Amino acid sequence: MNVYVMLALAILCELVGTMALKYADGFTRFWPSVIVVLGYGCAFYLLSLLVRHLPIGLVYAVWSGVGITLVALAGVVLFDQKLDWPGIAGMGMIIGGVVILNGFSNMGSH
């Protein structure tokens, strides 16, 4: 499987697990809690495979940066959370950092 497909799946698993945290209510609700554990378990399994092929700093930066941004946007859509200009600017800087790491840094070199 392509490493970038695996990374996208790891990010998606993290997103699902994090969204389920809201519904797990402190791990007092069974099925949402199961989804949290499976989501993060799948994400970390995929990350463990990815670091065989890509530098760990790059993998973690992309996974966490894109994950943070998607979770924040999902909070706006699913939970009616508000996103202000500093939040938008912060997410822009996170995405900018991920782009710089992938496009201009030698960090991704093997």
Image: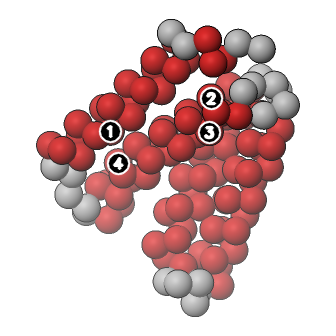
Which quarter of the figure is the N terminus placed in?
top right
The residue drawn where x is 20% and y is 57% is 82
Q: Which residue is mark 1?
A: 91
Q: Give the Cα separation between the discs numbered 4 and 3.
A: 20 Å
Q: Give the Cα separation between the discs numbered 3 and 1.
A: 16 Å
Relative side of 36 to 15, left or right: right
Label 3 Cα crowd, 10 Å radius (few <14 / some 14-19 / many 20+): some
- Tell me the SS state at disc 1: helix
Q: Exactly how many numbered labels are in the figure?
A: 4
The type of residue carrying mark 2 is Leu
Give the label, 4 or 3, closer to the camera.
3
Relative side of 46 to 96, left or right: right
The type of residue carrying mark 4 is Leu
The type of residue carrying mark 3 is Tyr
Residue 60 is tagged as 3
Give the label, 4 or 1, closer to the camera.
1
